[in-house]
Image: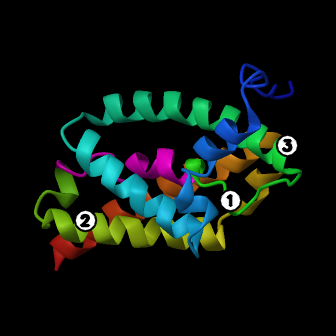
Amino acid sequence: MELAEPTWLRRLPAKFVIAVATLGPLGQRLPAPGTWGSLAGLLYTLLLFRRLSWAETLVYTLIASYVAVAFTGEAAKRMGRKDPGEVILDEFVVIPLVFLGWHSGFTSHLPEWVVALTGFGLFRFYDILKPLGIHRLQSWPGGWGIVVDDFVAALAACATLHLGAWLWALR
């Protein structure tokens, strides 16, 4: 079974598709665009997801990730590149996954700002270095390859965040 790319964006103007995929000037004009996209995603998470359950966060992020697959894949085609660095919608939409379950269990004893900064740093680590086979996910076609590696990097960051918080609580 091959993953089909969403085609519903093909009629939209290239300028609009690229602006959404790059989060406008964040991806197009700033240095280290992936970091800026991740910071914007952290703000997005704090504003919209901090009171949601893990299930709600997962469902909304899955929907947003599908939309990101469409926009990032179409933007990459229109830019003529496989995974342009300025396309940062992928980092933005997956950041809420880093914080699944952060208000319960192992992380509840930590200040929110510690969890937020640590989760952000862990996500950037996994997103940049792509260990544990995450780099292989980039070979998926089009927008799938652009988004799925970040999706898994966010889940790896989440697992590491919870493990670290659990170990911190044991001390």
Give the mark nearest the N terminus, 3 or 2: 3
Pointer 3 or 1: first along the chain: 3
Quarter containing the C terminus: bottom left
Where, quadrant-wise, is the N terminus in this rendering? Answer: top right
Viewer-nearest residue: 48 or 80 = 80
Look at 59% across and 30% down and name the residue there.
67
The numbered mark at residue 77 is 3
49 w.r.t. 125: above or below: above
Give the residue at mark 1: 134
- Near-viewer residue (27 or 52): 27
The residue under the point 68% across, 44% down is 18
Say whether residue 27 is magenta.
no
3D distance between C-alphas at marks 3 and 1: 22 Å
Tell me residue 46's x, y (percent): 25, 50
Task: Give the amino acid at mark 3.
Answer: Lys
Give the left or right position of residue 166, taking residue 80 as reference: left
- For discs 3 and 1, the disc positioned in front in the rendered view: 3
Tell me if residue 140 can be seen. no
Q: What whole-number distance in Å separates the C-alpha atoms at marks 1 and 2? A: 23 Å
Q: Which mark is residue 115?
A: 2
Direction bottom: furthest residue? 171
Against 20, residue 165 (above or below) is below
Q: Is residue 5 above or below residue 99?
A: above
Q: Disc 3 to disc 2, how far (Cα)? A: 36 Å
Q: Amino acid at mark 2?
A: Val
Residue 155 in the image, given as x and y percentages of width and height: 48, 52
- Which portion, as a residue range, is magenta? 91-104
Looking at the rendered structure, the secondary structure element under dot 2 is: helix
